[in-house]
Image (cartoon, coloured by chain):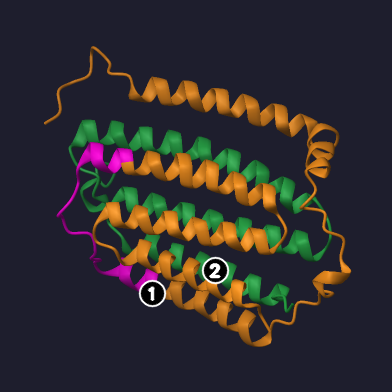
Amino acid sequence: MASILFLLFSTLTVLCAVGVVVNKNAVNAAGCLLLCLVGVAGLFVQLDAYLLAFILLLVYAGAVVALFLFIIMLLDVQGRQSFGFSGITTFAGLMAFALLLTGLGSIAIKGHLDAPRLNRLAVEGANLKSYAQQLFTTYLLPVQIIGFLLLIAMLGVIVLSKKHATEEPAK
Amino acid sequence: MMTASLNEYVIISSLLFVIGFFGVLLRRNTLVVFMCLELMLIASTLALVAFSRFNATMDGNIFVFFILTVAAAEVAVGLAIIVALFRKRQTVQIDQLDSLKN
């Protein structure tokens, strides 16, 4: 059996995820994505990963969704047709969706993932010190590579969004 | 206090993934497709955190840490590409972006 909080946050997450997909207005979809992320952060707190919940809210809800809203309003692409398929795309999409739903159903019905009760396990993710320990010993090289990746991404974004003098005018 | 089992977390995570996947297939607006991709990424991080918690290890949490960093970089680059595309073609609807078709 699940706790009340788990039910609350998982319902919020799933409903808002559906909202992202079905909302015709892109701004509303971004708002739904924000609420969905809040729900996932709540689930992270249930799993004792407080730091990750905090980072999820800061990075995703704070930065990424704000960036999305910024671009949506900048491009102003409202009021156009958002749904619709044609021919074989519909078939392939429906097949893939049916396969994924079958997998989900088999997890829900047959899946008995063996795990001990939570109160008997050590809470590793709640301890900030263990993050630091791991990041600066075992995962030191990945941390440096990630830093380099962020630098490259920043440079790439600057290059991409720069207006080139030779660029032909848009039609 | 009753706590949720690992199975329930995996179900929520896979449900989120399926919804995001469906959104990627269904929507025609590039920005919303991108948001649905983020949804799928979040679903995978939820599964990682849940498995990590129920196995009393740190590795899944550290991995989620890296995934969040990469996702932030990915969103920045992806949105820059979309803006560049919009500047060139004046549209972000997927069915109108077909210059590679012929």
Q: Which residue is mark 1?
A: A94
Residue type of the residue flagged with mark 1? Leu
Q: Which chain is green?
A: B
Q: Residue at x 69, y 58 (%)?
A: B49
Q: Position of residue A94 (x, y in %)?
A: 38, 74
Q: Which residues are magenta?
A: A70-94
Relative to residue A141, is residue A59 depicted above or below?
below
Q: Residue at x 45, y 62 (%)?
A: B20
| Residue A82 inside the magenta-drawn segment | yes
Q: Chain under label 2?
A: A
Near-viewer residue (A58 or B83)? A58
Quadrant assignment, res A148: top right
Q: Residue at x 44, y 58 (%)?
A: A35
| Residue B102 inside the magenta-drawn segment | no
Q: Colour of chain A?
A: orange
Near-viewer residue (B9 or A51)? A51
Q: In the image, is B73 to the left or to the right of A21?
A: right
